[in-house]
Image (cartoon, rainbow, N blue to C red):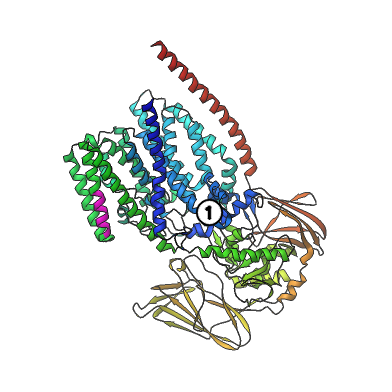
Amino acid sequence: MSYLNFRISSSFLAYTCSFCLPIIILCSIFVLSEVYPFGEGMVLITDLYHQYVHHYSYILEAVKGDESLLYSWTAGLGSNFIGNIAYYTASPLLIILFFFPERLLPEAVLVLILVKFGLCGLSISYFIRKKFTTIKLYEVVLFSCFYALMSYNITYYYNVMWLDGVILLPLIILSVDAILHNKGITPYVIILSLLFISNFYISYMIGLFVFLYFIIDLLLLKKVKPDYEAKAVFLKFVKGTSISIGLTAFLTIPTFFQLMNSLGYDQQDSHNDFSMNFILKLFSGVFDSVENGSPNIYIGTFVLLLVPIFYICKINWYEKVKWSILFSILAISFVVPPLNLFWHAGDIPNWFPYRYSFIFSFILFYMSLAAFEKVHTIRFKILILPILFSAIMVTVMSFTNEGELNIVANNTTIFLLCVVILMKKLNIKKAAIITLVLYTLIELFFNSAVVYLKVNGELLRPNRDQYTIFDEYKSAIDQIKTLDPMPYFRIETDANKTNNDSLTLDHSSVGHSSSMLDNDLIKTMDSLGIYSRKANYSRKGSTILTDSLFGLKYFVSSSELEDDGYELVSRANKLYIYRNNNYLPIGYPVVENIKNLKIEDIQNPFEFQSKIYQTLFETKDTLFELINPEKIQYQHAKLEGLDNSKKLIGHGKDGDITIKYFLNVNSQSRLYALFDIANAKDMEGLNVFINGKEADEYITSHFIGILELGKFNNEQVVIELHFDEEVVEFASDELFYRINTKNFSKYVNQIDRDAFTITELKGNKMKAHITINEEDQLLFLSIPWDEGWRISIDGEKVKPIKVLGAFMGIPLEKGKYELQMTFIPKGFLAGSFITCISLLIFSVIILRERKKRREVKVIDHDEEVAS
């Protein structure tokens, strides 16, 4: 009994260490890199800062009952939120955030990341204990740290929801093995369901791998055991997968429909620096890029030595065949673009390439563990060749690509591992333990620190005060809501930290960033000249018309504002609160002809806005007037004319390609420009100077749209473009316009702002009074069109039409009406019904499997008594 207790306590200690040690190593790196509270930095970088933390903030409020889980009025102009939950916030581990006050959300996310790294170590240690029973407990702990701190996790730690897949991958493989041995499906169903819920995107990749793993293993087992019940096992697998899909249908089905509306926009050629970097990524301390880098596959330099040994150890041939096939499929997928695209569910990633590379690392890890367990069966002389090969490979690759530090670090760890293997063969236990611990700590700390620092260097980690600034703007937003009793209007700020600020600040806006954004909305924004791209749109590029059209009523600014139509109404500490006098409500009656405007008919956003202006206000006035430059100068470049375009080829060392436009402004005018640059996606940025003064960056690798130049009066305006590029190609002529706002306010005031009065706005529901005073009108709603809206007028269901490509319109006769709108995501009710049925079926299966296990125990007990 004492021996049993020792075994239990030893296993518990091993699991505890497997959980804690990766956290300790990662914490030490955070401390050394001055993450708050040990410095001014944050773990919130790139999408974690721009998207996820704001979705977390929203979900915390939604769970409290203050917001809807189905529809968000504060996600930009309004958005179906079910897909955001499935992609960003469905992980059960998010419960950690509820134990922190909102002001400490960055620290809560830090704890969430650490816990997930710890769980990676815990899950893989359990996997190792089940699959490799002769590997010692201290070896289990040390190897589990390599899995938890693999380069994939360190490089993509800010994509927190992906880590759930890394945690669950070893467990789901164990559950699949149970099915392959004709055992119950309950563990498989539970783990696969958790995977689907945690993140549908990574679950797709793991699901694909699990299917390959199962089919390959099934075929090989059938070959090894002629009497193997392959058909019954296959049906079990299908049944378990089907139940898991059914259990999560309430989330996955509506997410699928939303995803179908978000795929395929703004696709670009996948360009990733593969080449020799793929081999380099097997070494510690190697990082290239999170934008177009090669796969992050490092999981320990031991794979350089142990994977070759895998093929010469006494391991079952079908194991070698199975893992070799899986290895080959993943390796080929990295090289062949269509296969790479298939692993990404047919959608080319924006940054963060090879998002499934952790699966390849897992394959290498398994092969290495299998070799390590059997290494004692090999004569040491045979090991000399893999050892020499690894040492030479490390030296050559590190020297030519990563410098002397990597030579020392990688050769040191390879040497230590060789010593461990030698001691393992000679059964020198204490020295082997000490050496293996040194090997683990040196390599993991070196790789984790180097990769973490390089990632932060590329992505420019923000300081914590850039998050605390939200507190100042939050007080201004609260002040506006106190001053203005209307239940709904849109607000913008110049906090400009992210396009999801509104989720944290709790207001509707003209900006949102999400992988689940509807393509039609992005296309409409793009047609209007608003800065937009796949999964992103913002107020940049807005004009007096779009501010009115989208119901922008207030602007909170850190400095005095000079935009047309805005009036200072209050102050909140150092912030200015402006009201837009040209504001239009979320709904208002307009001429029915607006439904005939098609975004694809007019390519020029200035002309498109003028057409909306003329239709909306029934006028022949034009909103924008074209201004042709008096002169254009090209410097440090040769100009080549193309069909309907032009190309500039730089002179090399002479300097940046520079274009100067000279505009004569004869009266007070606000000027705008649009530069349609064909190769803008390849550019890091474009520096714009207006009369010698540098303006905001106009073009990055993501955005292109209308640029406001400023207000000028009786002067010559010189606009300079500076390109740090060898070739610049324009797809069309550069456009310069002045805006005519002379009668704008008069026209806006003609629209009956009281014709649409919101009487109730709560969660996913809205009620309003409508008054239509003229014939041939429709109610325009600046709410993004979505099939999930259920609308009734005076109790009768109506179907809205699409207006301007992405918004809703309801044709109405003259009269007064009661409007009721309820949002239920498409597929949500059907998915919920399927989930309920699947839950009942799964409950029956659990009871049957439990009964069967009891019967087996009784039989075993009877046989034991009889013997």
Task: Give above or below for 643 relative to 145.
Answer: below
The image shows residue 811 at horizontal and vertical percentages of: 75, 58
Task: Give above or below for 305 relative to 469.
Answer: above
For the N terminus, which image quadrant?
top left
Q: Secondary structure beneath disc 1?
A: loop
For the C terminus, which image quadrant?
top left
The image shows residue 570 at horizontal and vertical percentages of: 69, 72
Residues in magenta? 405-414
Label 1: few (<14), some (14–19) or many (≥20) C-alpha neighbours in 10 Å: many
Our reading of the magenta stretch's main secondary structure is helix
Residue beneath the point at 40% across and 52% down = 26
The image shows residue 256 at horizontal and vertical percentages of: 56, 47
Residue 785 belongs to magenta span: no
User: In the shown orientation, is residue 756 left or right of residue 237?
Assistant: right
Residue beneath the point at 72% across and 64% down = 482
The amino acid on which the numbered mark 1 sits, given as a three-letter code, is: Leu
Q: Nearer the viewer, residue 80 or 804?
A: 80
Task: Check the image and name the residue furthest to the front.
Answer: 2
Residue beneath the point at 54% across and 55% down = 105
Q: Nearer the viewer, residue 548 or 5?
A: 5
Task: Give above or below for 267 relative to 69.
Answer: below
- Residue 600 showing in the rendered view: no
The image shows residue 735 at horizontal and vertical percentages of: 55, 76
| Residue position for label 1 | 263
User: In the shown orientation, is residue 223 left or right of residue 192?
Assistant: left
Q: Quadrant of the rendered structure where residue 650 is?
A: bottom left
